[in-house]
Image (tube, rainbow, N blue to C red):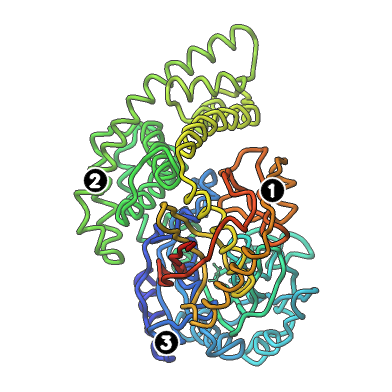
Amino acid sequence: MKAIDIRNKYLKFFESHGHTVIPSAPVIPENDPSVLFTTAGMHPLVPYLLGEKHPAGTRLTDYQKCIRTVDIDEVGDNRHLTYFEMLGNWSLGDYFKEESIAMSYEFLTKELGISADKLSVTCFAGDDDAPRDEVSYECWKKAGIPEERIYFFGKDDNWWIAGEEGPCGPDTEMFYDTGKPKCSENCNPSCGCGKYVEIWNNVFMEYCKGKDGKITKLQQRNVDTGLGLERMAMLLQGVETPFEIELFAPVMKKLESLQKQDFIQSRRIVAEHLRSSMMMINDGGRPSNVDRGYILRRLLRRMTRHLNKLEIDLAKLPEIIDTSIEALKEMYPELEKNRETIKSVIIEEKDKFMKTLEKGEKEFEKVVTKLKQENKIKLEAETVFNLYETYGFPPEMTQELALEAAMKVDMEGFDKLFQEHQEKSRLGSEAKFKGGLASTGEMEVKYHTATHLLNAALKVILGDHVHQKGSNITSERMRFDFAHPAKMTNEEKQQVEDLVNEWIQAGLAVTAQEMPKEDALKTGAECMFIEKYPDVVTVYSIGEVSKELCGGPHVKNTSELGHFKIKKEEASSSGVRRIKAILEN
Ligand code: SER
């Protein structure tokens, strides 16, 4: 069965079970700077899992374009992909375990025709946070899975959360038995030897993990499921790797026909990174030196390097891109529409990289030759850093080349140097920032302190899930963006306003304390993006009510602030609210 047929069957099946088909969100999340890419189908649905009403109802299904970058370095083996498509269905406070499991079983066995003998499942074994999932166990038995193929595991295997906080819960996972021999007597779906391949994950999201690590019940019981499309296609087509399914096979063949050197790993890396890059560019991604842009740059650079390794003439790149679009366009017609943009971004980046590479590789060779003459087998951190700083040569490339040259690399040392360097440039920009604030007026300083109070008050009134997403201050007003799934009621707004004013009237002292970042985190201090802070940070406390990592400046006492008033509360983006407020005399 082709991937597109699996996708269509899936959407049709869930539609016939009362689900509304919703479109895939872009791989680059809209209005969410806190994550680089959409990593799962549930990602764009977080506000609705937390309780906001979805306009399409309580039963949803979609295919979601996903990027997971943790495994970039693994791509080239027989299974890792950075881009993949996730098929999903959701119950937003609608059905729960029984119906979800019954539908999954029916879809796998009847629609996809997978023999029930090939299926094993796992359930959550229970701990202090949630009980043993006997309900799922019973549902699987009722559906037709025999007891001996139902396993129980702990949080490591059967609990799902996106990152560190947010909606979460126990899950039940479905595994396909490839028929390979057991790796040991105790071989089971969690052992990862390759006999069992995970095909679907149904998460029963009835909990939410707060920033403090506490797990509380959500106001509704949700189901969030995810099925990896490429993997399913691979199993149903009876092939060993995703690179053999129709989405990759034509590109793999094309590369083989163009190559002068034969490296299967390199062909896979080119085919995979090309597809991921095209999906990113298609959704607006462009190569750069930071965040998302740097990931895209890394993918395109690695792709180029492996084209070189295969000794494929780079003038053939447009043809290779066309072959890939041809293989993918039935699933993603948008690629065809954006063909010219995609091509020009990729080719421009390739050209830039070739120039960097030439210089960098020459320098690398020089360094290695010298080291070898000296009978040394290790590249010191400074060398890696110098290649990066002076020649723009990517550290991961140095690492890869060194491996090929049988040299060791002090990457840890490099990371340290890199961080020191980041720190220096951060201090530089902070100095600029401080300079800017030197001319900051009295009102801006007051609004700055009021922002901390508002953040704290929102948490008290609305709950711990409130998290700062942005802030903007002028001498006239303050603006504060924060994560919260629903419009605030008039009563909530009044309560927040009253609480801030109560704190102002209480004349709370504002104090600053310098401490190591880890200690600051242990005190439970608020911060927006922890990785953006230096090792030693300043924590501003306002009485006992607020503690935040911050550069200041602030007023000395809240009594200086005057009267706080909320002027407006509105949506800023999905799951993010915006408050505009003023201080009056
Ligand atoms: N969110 C779960 C996952 O990504 C199920 O969709 O596996």
User: Who comes first in sequence, dot 1 or dot 2?
Assistant: 2
Give the side of residue 320 with respect to residue 516, left or right.
left
Local packing at callout 2 (Cα closer than 10 Å; few below 14, some 14-19, many 20+) is some
Residue 439 place in picture, x, y as percent: 45, 38
Indicate if the residue with disc 2 has its beta carbon within 8 Å of ligand 1: no
Q: Which mark is residue 57?
A: 3
Give the side of residue 532 with respect to residue 234, left or right.
right
73 or 532: which is nearer to us?
Answer: 532
What residue do we see at 37% from left, 55% from top?
248
User: Is residue 431 placed above or below 327 in the rendered structure?
Assistant: above
What residue do we see at 40% from left, 91% from top?
16
What is the three-letter code of the residue carrying label 2? Lys
Residue 120 visible in the current orientation: no
Q: Which mark is residue 343?
A: 2
Secondary element under disc 2, as helix, strand or loop, is helix
Residue 334 place in picture, x, y as percent: 25, 62
Q: Label 1 to label 2, Cα distance in Å?
A: 55 Å
What is the three-letter code of the residue carrying label 1? Thr
